[in-house]
Image (cartoon, rainbow, N blue to C red):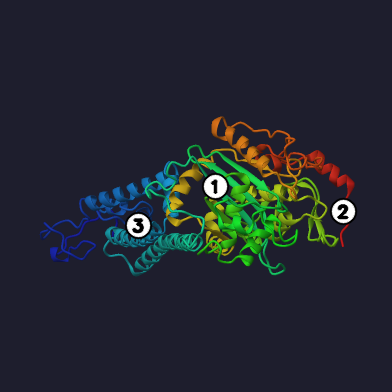
Amino acid sequence: MWSPGDTEWIDPTAVRDYTGLPLAGESRGSRRTYGRHAAPGFGSALGYTVLGALLPGTAFLASGRRRLGAVVLTVFLLLLAGGVWLATAGRGEAIRLAVDSTALVVAIGGVVLLALAWLVVVVGGYRAVLPRGARGWQHALGVLVVLLLCAGVVAPAAKVVQIASAQRDLVDTVFADEDSATVTAPVDESRPFGDKEEVNILLLGGDGGSDREGVRTDTVIVANVQTDTGATTLFSLPRNLEDLPFPADSPLAAVYPDGFDAGSESESLLNAVYRNGPAAHPDILGPTADPGADFLKLGVGEALGLHIDYYVLVNLDGFSRLVDALGGITVNVNYYVPIGGEPTLGTLPDDYIAPGPDQRMDGPTALAYSRGRFGLTDYQRMDRQRCVLNAIVKAANPVTLLTRFQELAATTQDIVSTDVPQDLLGDVVDVAMKVKDNAIRSVVFDDTVIRPAYPDYGLIRTLVQQALAPATDTGSTASAPAPSSSSAAPAPPAPSTPAGNTAAGSADTVTDACAYDPVQAQAALAAGEPPTR
């Protein structure tokens, strides 16, 4: 068997490189070599083939084809450096590309071409280092190794293509650029936010499902984001807020001059506006894909004294599937949270989630934790819903997103809708990168500040401006003053509020309300589980 260093005298017409072409400059009696190097043994050839698959170009260098090897290796190192930059310093640009439908198509094509080129390099490198005279079993083993290496190239490339395709479908489905009665295109498309110092996004949790008629938005939160710093303040409104006002220049002000009224108190609450407003006046706002969201954008914006730019609606009926797609979430529980039950009918819960730290919850349990209110207040439920959102953000780590992305993308398409324009996503990403570097602050309008049945919207607007002033100037916490004597009605005494929750009307970090309180939890456990069915 031939080994490194062996020589043989052959006819020059039989001398060919791995492409099958005669080697230039050979004459009768020349030594059989690969470039300037003696041909490697079969074992070395397999080693160089594997190395050439991991570090493209090295197999060509080992065979003496230095120019080709140097070019391939240089291109690979440049691509690797670009990938490292996108994963570190260029993460913002990577995310911008990930929300650009056209860029995703280009990326898919680029990955396919790169994979094909890599396959050519693997096969070509093997043929370049394969010694002549290899036996049959060596050829078979070599082909098997090459096939395995090719599979190692194709498998991750196919996964990347699947993820990019799922991401493109997600972008095109959720950000479909449908008609909106409340979104205005920027005057200067090169600066979508223009000179705006802030962007306000309405976050809605739609509690729809097979057991409910229509969609009620039991979660209504406005995220105020300062575009220059990313400082974010959440304003939470109670589901039972009444007399929602509308801007004077809106057609809704003409049909609801004294605030939203659907004929009965239970159907005139804030959580019923999304369903009942468009049902009573389906075409009043003109062409729009989601009239309920437009009703709320106008009304909630007027209530807070803010211009609402966009909305995001999450249907909580599909929310459990999102949590399961993430593999579950972890939250702290400070008191017994009911599973099921109907407080208005006196129907007892089926069970309770017991107090305890760092509880791992699957989708149905997390949904029950978000919804439960038997024997509790709406404000406690609002706190828990913010904690669940915070837990979802924590659960969406890079490893989870990569391994479960297709399931997450498919689930998100089913449960999320928004009127954020697709062309604006890159700029939203820029602001989001700033947001993640800031602690998110929260203001809860509960019944220690306002009476939901007789709300003083003037007081609400004042508290909003006071909360935003420090977010813009110093980032410190804003404390709400006690309701003034000019309020429509004095606030009732403060109800018992779980320790660690955000004080009513003040701005504090969201995580404060989600921290584990061992004193309160132990007190709840000592009192025992409340009655069930």
- Asked if residue 362 lies left or right of residue 202, the reply is right
Earlier-in-chain disc, 3 versus 1: 3
- Asked if residue 15 lies left or right of residue 398, the reply is left
What is the CA distance from the residue labelled 1 to the residue labelled 2?
Answer: 43 Å
Amino acid type for the residue under numbered disc 3: Thr
Earlier-in-chain disc, 1 versus 2: 1
Earlier-in-chain disc, 2 versus 3: 3
Q: Nearer the viewer, residue 491 or 150?
A: 491
Which label sits in the foreground, 3 or 1? 1
Which residue is labeled 1 in the image?
A: 307
Q: Secondary structure at mark 1?
A: loop
Q: Position of residue 217 (x, y in %)?
A: 66, 58
The answer to whether any part of residue 511 appears in the image is no
Residue at 78 percent across and 61 percent down: it is 340
Q: Are marks 3 and 1 in contact (CB under 8 Å)?
A: no
Residue at 37 percent across and 68 percent down: it is 140
Q: Residues within 10 Å of mark 1 (few under 14, many from 20)?
A: some
Q: Nearer the viewer, residue 445 or 489?
A: 489
Q: Position of residue 489 (x, y in %)?
A: 77, 42
The label number, if any, that marks residue 530 in the structure image? 2
Amino acid type for the residue under numbered disc 1: His
Q: Position of residue 353 (x, y in %)?
A: 78, 54
What is the CA distance from the residue labelled 3 to the residue labelled 1?
Answer: 62 Å
Q: Nearer the viewer, residue 323 or 374?
A: 374
The label number, if any, that marks residue 49 in the structure image? 3
Which label sits in the foreground, 1 or 2? 1
In this rendering, the answer to whether 8 lies above or below 302 is below
